[in-house]
Image (cartoon, helix red, strand yellow):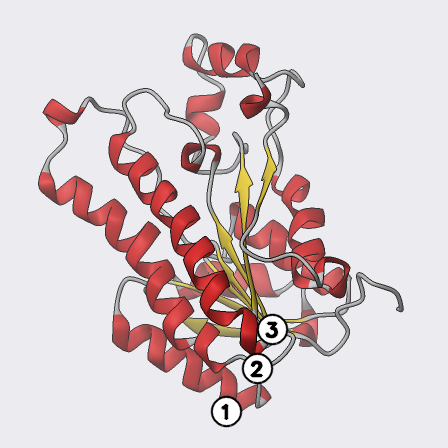
Amino acid sequence: MSGDFDLTGKVCVVTGAGRGIGRGMAEGLARNGALVVLTGRTRTTLEEAAESFGERAFIQTADVSKEADVIALRDAVLAHFGKIDVLVNNAGVNAIFKGIERTSLTEWQEIIDVNLTGVFLCCKYIGGAMTQGGSVINVSSVAGHTGLLRSVPYCASKGGVEMLTKALALDWASKGVRVNTLAPGWVDTDLTHGLLEHDVHGQRLKARTPMGRFAGPDDMAGGVVFLASDASAYMTGQSLVIDGGWTAG
C-alpha cells in the first residue's frame, strides 16, 4: 500500500476498541496497514474484536479514568512495539438523558472521569510518548459543538475535549505531534441501538438528521484514517465533524 493514507508500520492505540465506534475505527486503521493496540476495560470483548485483526492486533486492558492503568498501557505498548505513532481517544460513556435537577454528583463525575479526565490522562502519558509525526485523535461528539436535551454532563465533557484538543495542539505543534478531534453524530451501536430504534425518540432524532439515517461505526473509519495519516499532515487543533448534517442547520 502507498499514498497519503498509508499507515503501514504505524502503531495505533485505540481506547474503547472492543465494540462500536472504537472497533470500527480500529478496523479502518488496520485495513490501511496499521498495527493496532486494542484497549478497553473488558478483555473478553477485546479478544472477540481481535479475532478479525490477526497479527495486526495487540490487546491490553485498561480503564482510562485510572492513572495507573494508563501508565501501564503506555509501558506495555512501548515494550511490545518500541514506539507509539497514533492515539485514538475513543473510550467514553453515554449521556444519561436527565435534567440537571435529577442528575447526581456521582453520575456527573462518572461521565467527566471517563470522557474528559480519561482523554487528559491518555494524552499526558501515551501522547506524551510520541515524537515527530505523531497524531492524537480525540473522539468528541456533536455534543461538543451544540447542546443536546437532558445531556448536561455529556455535553460538558465533550465540550471540554474540544478545548483540551485546541490547547494541546498549540503546546505540541513545535514537537511535530498533531492533535485533532473527530466528532460523530448519532451512531448506531450496541450502546445506542435501543434509543435510536425507539418509536418516538429514535424517529425524532432521525428526522432531525438531514441525511435521513444514523451512522454506522464504519462511517467513522475514513475520518480516523485521514487524521492518523499524512493526508492531514498540516491539520492540527481542528474538529472533523461527521454527523450527517446534524450541526449544519
Q: How many marks?
A: 3
Mark 2 crowdedness (10 Å alpha carbons): few <14, some 14-19, many ≥20: some
- Check residue 79 in the rendering and tell me which mark sits there, or answer none: 1
As shown in the figure, which amino acid type bears the numbered disc 3?
Answer: Gly
Instruction: Specify the amino acid type for callout 1.
Output: Ala
What is the secondary structure assignment of the residue under circle 1?
Answer: helix
Residue located at (34% from left, 63% from top): 120
Please report contact status of discs 3 and 2: CB closer than 8 Å, yes or no: yes
The disc placed on residue 134 is 3
Residue 75 in the image, given as x and y percentages of width and height:
42, 86
Name which of mark 3 and mark 1 comes first in the sequence: 1
User: Which quadrant is the N terminus positioned in?
Assistant: bottom right
Quadrant for the C terminus, please: top right
Q: Position of residue 42 (x, y in %)?
A: 38, 61
Counting from the top left corner in percent of width and height, residue 205 is at 49, 16
Q: Nearer the viewer, mark 1 or mark 2?
A: 2
Q: Residue under circle 2? A: 131
Q: CA distance from mark 3 to mark 2?
A: 6 Å
Does residue 104 lie above or below 182 as drawn?
above
Q: CA distance from mark 3 to mark 1?
A: 18 Å
**Vertically, is 145 above or below 135?**
above
Amino acid type at circle 2 is Thr
Q: In the depicted view, which residue is nearer to us: 174 or 149?
A: 174
Image check: 120 left or right of 13? left
Q: CA distance from mark 1 to mark 2?
A: 16 Å
Residue 209 is situated, as x and y percent measured from the top left of the image, at 58, 17
Check disc 3: other Cα within 10 Å, few if <14, some if 14-19, many if 20+.
many
Q: Pointers 1 and 2 in contact (CB under 8 A)? A: no
Identity of the residue drawn at 83% across and 63% down: 4
The answer to whether 57 appears left or right of 201 in the picture is right
* 147, above or below 88, in the image: above
